[in-house]
Amino acid sequence: MKAIIPAAGLGTRFLPATKCTAKELLPVLDKPVIQYVVEEALEPDGVDGVIIVNSREKPEIERYFSVDGAFEEMLRSHGKAALADVVHASSSLPVSFVYQDEPLGLGHAVHCAAEKVGDEPFFVLLGDYFVPDRQMCVNMARVSKAHGDASVIAVAPVPADQVSRYGIIGGECVGSLPGSDAEGEREGAVWKVSGLVEKPAPEEAPSHLFIVGRYLLSPRIMSLLASQGAGAGGEIQLTDSMERLLETEEMYALVVNPADGCDTGTPAAWAATNARMALGDDAYRAAFLEELGDAAAGLTT
Ligand code: G1P
């Protein structure tokens, strides 16, 4: 089973940093953002490979996930064997690449990986967000198993005035994650999806539950994406093909806490994610607070 990470965006929000560095390779502490997403994608049982949908403008992502024996040898010859091992481990992750030649939307990006996915269900993880404990996709797989291997998406409540920024689901709560008794819009509740709308006006939103960016999808979605016309924003939307999938298959949504994950989609969110990860990591916390000096006091005011 594969996981797809769409990563063909140009990262204009991070210019000028992204003029010659892919935004996916910007570090959170000492690791590129995309490596956190790859490691999260590999966590659920049965996922044995990640397909990154890249653009031809960012060959450095492919280089990052390729073994560079000469570089590792150089590190070893300088007495840095432990670092060489760290570099080798990240270079050897089971990652392959396909290319999206035109920025036609998320649905188009996912469809670029159709051949590699084959006839198996697959995950999609949007790359501007990662979940450090890696449990969100694991829990989605549990919900899928409990419902006959149906498609499952992660959703969360959003204020009414923000629904037009996201994909929004309609449906009803039908239960909860095994081991939880959550109901309604509480974390752990499970909804049966009856409709999906991409970026609706507030008065057209079927609920206040937005699609968080983690999907476990039936392979049938690929044939629907092949014929999907442009939708919101003139883009080929994954959400629109998921809506069509409902005509023939059941789909469920797991209510999650988006704050379990870290956002890296804007410079401010990326900076906050670095701070959060440093504060949560025993190897960094003390040094990070010391480096901040007097500014650390400002964190609590
Ligand atoms: C995409 C999806 C949308 C989802 C969102 C989550 O939108 O199309 O359904 O809610 O990601 O971040 P985008 O952010 O690409 O506009």
Image (cartoon, rainbow, N blue to C red):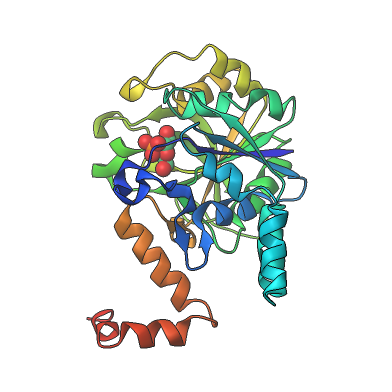
Query: Between residues 250 and 113, which one lies in front from this camera angle?
Result: 113
Q: How many marks?
A: 0
Identify which residue is drawn at 70% across, 74% down: 82
Name which quarter of the figure residue 145 lies in. Answer: top right
As drawn, 55 above or below 85 = above
Identify which residue is drawn at 71% across, 59% down: 88
As drawn, 165 above or below 220 = below
Residue 261 % position (x, y): 48, 58
Q: Is residue 68 left or right of residue 188?
A: right
Residue 115 % position (x, y): 69, 23
Look at the image and tell me in which quarter the N terminus lies: top right
Query: Between residues 289 and 200, which one lies in front from this camera angle?
Result: 289
Name which quarter of the figure residue 263 lies in. Answer: bottom left
As drawn, 63 above or below 280 = above
Query: Between residues 19 and 13, which one lies in front from this camera angle?
Result: 19
Look at the image and tell me in which quarter the C terminus lies: bottom left
- The answer, for residue 285, to whether it is visible in the render is yes
Ligand 1, image quadrant it occupies: top left
Identify which residue is drawn at 63% across, 47% down: 140
Query: Between residues 191 and 274, which one lies in front from this camera angle?
Result: 274
Residue 245 % position (x, y): 57, 21
As drawn, 68 above or below 97 = below
Q: Is residue 290 left or right of residue 48?
A: left
- The answer, for residue 167, to whether it is visible in the render is no
